[in-house]
């Protein structure tokens, strides 16, 4: 097994870039969830679908749909 190298300035900078990329990824995922669950909530609020019908169509439980809307839409 190859021994680990000491932290060089290049390695430290690379780790920071990876951390920054992970942060950007997490923010993008959060934004995508907010967009998706806002669209789901809008359909339910417009009474185009009931919460149960929405959950059945999306293959989630009604409780999951409720919790995700509360988490990503109502928390704004």
Image (spheres, rainbow, N blue to C red):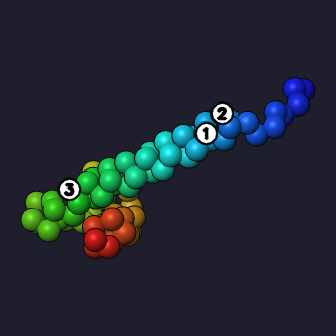
Tags 1 and 2 touching, CB below 8 Å: yes
Judging depth in this view, the residue of 35 and 55 nearest the camera is 35
| Residue position for label 3 | 39
In the figure, residue 75 lies in which quadrant? bottom left
- Crowdedness near tag 3: few (<14), some (14–19) or many (≥20) residues, C-alpha within 10 Å: some
| Mark drawn on residue 10 | 2
Work out whether mark 1 precedes mark 3 in sequence or the reverse, and give the earlier one. 1
| Callout 3: SS | helix
Q: Is residue 4 left or right of residue 44?
A: right
What residue is rendered at 23% in x and 60% in y?
38
Measured from the top left, where is residue 20 in percent x and y?
50, 46
| Callout 2: SS | helix
What residue is rendered at 88% in x and 31% in y?
3
Task: Give the Cα distance between marks 2 and 3.
Answer: 43 Å
Task: Give the Cα distance between marks 1 and 3.
Answer: 39 Å
Closer to the eye: label 2 or 3:
2
Judging depth in this view, the residue of 57 and 11 nearest the camera is 11
| Mark drawn on residue 13 | 1
| Callout 1: SS | helix
């Amino acid at each position: 097994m190859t021994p680990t190298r000491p932290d060089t300035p290049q390695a430290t900078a690379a780790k920071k870039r990876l951390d920054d990329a992970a942060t950007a990824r997490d923010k993008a995922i959060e934004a995508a969830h907010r967009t998706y669950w806002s669209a789901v909530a809008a359909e339910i609020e417009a009474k185009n679908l009931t919460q149960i019908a929405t959950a059945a169509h999306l293959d989630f439980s009604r409780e999951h749909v409720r919790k995700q809307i509360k988490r990503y839409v109502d928390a704004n």
